[in-house]
Image (cartoon, grey):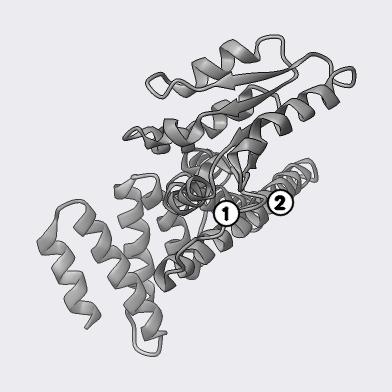
Amino acid sequence: MFACAKDERLIRPTSETIQQSASGKAQGPIRFCYLDADAPLLPQLEEVADGAQGLIVFGLDAFLNVPGQIVAFNFSREGLHALGKPILFWASQHTLALIGNLATDLFSQRRGANVYFDELADIQEPDPFLQSHFSEILRNQEETKQLELALELQKKQLTEAIEAKLSPKRIALDYALPLAKTYAGLDGHSEALKILEEYAPLQGVDWPPALYADVGRIYQGAHRYTEAIELFERAIHYYDKPGENQSTLSIYLSELGDIFKELGSFTQAHDYYERDL
């Protein structure tokens, strides 16, 4: 956690009070750690944390003023958690706001890490774009939590379906595909492919046309472009007929164009974009 004091003279006596209050209650001492701005963070904390019940850390403001340290600090959150000890960082309000602001981008990049803020520093100088982006990240975090809950339920349902000896097609369509999509939504593309290849292989399931693109997106996310292209082409073949949903066809043409663009096949990408017009 972080603590701020309007008057720096309060920091030392407050820390000593916390330390003394914890003595006799904690299984080990609460130790002070004074950061060296020129040394990596985690080794400093690990050295002081050995045998301690918790840490109170000073010097974070100066530490984060060193170029690159604030990025390293945010990317050290898993390491801080691995210490398994409560850590209190003293920081100025400016530093705390800076961490909160930069974390918006870092969390969007590392969403699979599933690290969440329980409380976030206020942005000192509100900016409409930043506030909007901040809200989007919070929504992403909530969506991730919901996907994690769905993942556990779907894994259980797949196991029960297998034990009940349901038909392979029903297992593939009703249980394996939803589970694979959830894994993919959590950036677990390798796990998603394992599920598909074991329970819903491309040649072993007669996919309903609407599901070809769903499976294709999973292969695309895993950079398995040959399979992704094949699946999107099947979906396009079905919908490229009079009377079929042309808006759905337009989406699939555009998505397949995007795949070829990723591969650097710009002529083929252009062809699919042209068909989408």
Secondary structure state at the residue bearing disc 2:
helix
The kind of residue on which mark 2 rests is Leu
Query: How far apart are the alpha carbons under marks 2 and 1?
Result: 27 Å
Q: Circle 1 is placed at which residue position?
A: 121
Q: Position of residue 151 (x, y in %)?
A: 66, 48
Instruction: Please state which of residues 127 and 144 is positioned toward the viewer in this rendering.
Output: 127
Which residue is painted at 57% across and 60% down in the image?
138
Q: Is residue 273 left or right of residue 36?
A: left
Q: Which quadrant of the rendered structure holds the C terminus? A: bottom left
SS of the residue at dot 1?
loop
Q: Is residue 43 left or right of residue 157?
A: left
Q: Which amino acid type is shown beneath numbered disc 1? A: Ala
Q: Is residue 176 left or right of residue 212?
A: right
Residue at left offset 41%, top offset 24%: 37
Tell me the residue at 27%/58% (across/down). 259
**Which label number is shown at residue 149?**
2
| Left/right of residue 123 with respect to residue 254 in the rendered view | right
